[in-house]
Image (cartoon, helix red, strand yellow):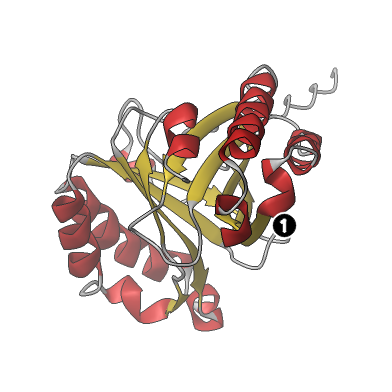
Amino acid sequence: MAEKEPKAKEKRQFVRFAAYRVDPAWRRLPQQERDASRKEFLAALEEVRATLILRTYSCLGTRGDFDFLLWLISDRLEAFQDFQARLLKTGLGKYLTLPHSYLGMTKRSIYVDKHVHEGQEGVRLTVKPGEAKYLFVYPFVKTRDWYRLTRSARQGMMDEHIAVGHRYPSVKLNTTYSFGLDDQEFIVAFESDVPADFLDLVMELRETEASRYTLRDTPILAGIAVPAETMLDLLG
């Protein structure tokens, strides 16, 4: 009997959320110098769009420890390294710090088989950012006791968790996995045009049984979707 050929590995993506803070000293530079550094930085952002997916968010007024958020998606981990190096070489890049950076990969969820429908989060191996106005991102870590539960026990709690999420269709969830890649285990990113729905969703999820096994789900990065040029103009 002929040996079966091994199944081809499904293509997965790397995902990164990077929150940047601008040193206040940059705002005290002469106007002409700031304008030139913004233009150079914008050119760098546009240049990398040829090699990865990029979404830009302003965080002015939503957080005090960073100013803007970038959502990056690529098939190659090296693309993030090249991107970061490119930004640091710009005039504005010299004034940036990186308070928060989350790295993950796509992976099929083991809990959504009973809830599958076309486009269902959890069965996708490619991330497709939408056009929602707001993005809410946070790292997620489960307790060790969660992994000691039986698969059926975890499935039952996740069924409840997923059912709650389905009651908020205005909120789109994107989950990526960070085991061995970063400090957290998961990164959850919610897109929505209705912040109140997201708040109510998170509050309701606190009451689910699975919430007992959450070890950490902060800090939360909240951003407002804007074009890259607007994001830079808002910096001052």
| Viewer-closest of 27 and 134 | 27
Residue 79 as seen in the image, left or right of residue 158: right
Q: Residue at x 35, y 81 (%)?
A: 212
Residue 144 sits in which quadrant? bottom right
Three-letter residue code for mark 1: Leu
- Examine the rendered structure and indicate whether residue 195 appears above or below residue 230: below
- Examine the rendered structure and indicate whether residue 75 appears above or below residue 69: above
| Viewer-closest of 115 and 27 | 27
Q: Residue at x 41, y 78 (%)?
A: 213
- Examine the rendered structure and indicate whether residue 223 appears above or below residue 150: above
| Viewer-closest of 129 and 207 | 129
Question: Which secondary structure lies at badge 1?
Answer: loop
The x, y position of residue 170, in whole percent, is 19, 40
Q: Which residue is mark 1?
A: 181
Q: Quadrant of the N terminus?
A: top right
Residue 201 as seen in the image, left or right of residue 222: left
Residue 222 sits in which quadrant? bottom left
| Viewer-closest of 37 and 187 | 37
Q: Taking the image as drawn, is residue 167 in sight?
A: yes
The x, y position of residue 45, in whole percent, is 63, 28
Residue 232 as seen in the image, left or right of residue 178: left
Crowding near pointer 1: few (<14 within 10 Å), some, many (20+)?
Answer: few
Q: Taking the image as drawn, is residue 126 in sight?
A: no
The x, y position of residue 78, in whole percent, is 81, 37
Number of numbered discs overlaid on the protein picture = 1
Q: Residue at x 65, y 32 (%)?
A: 41
The x, y position of residue 48, in whole percent, is 68, 24
Looking at this rendering, what residue extends furthest in the right direction? 2
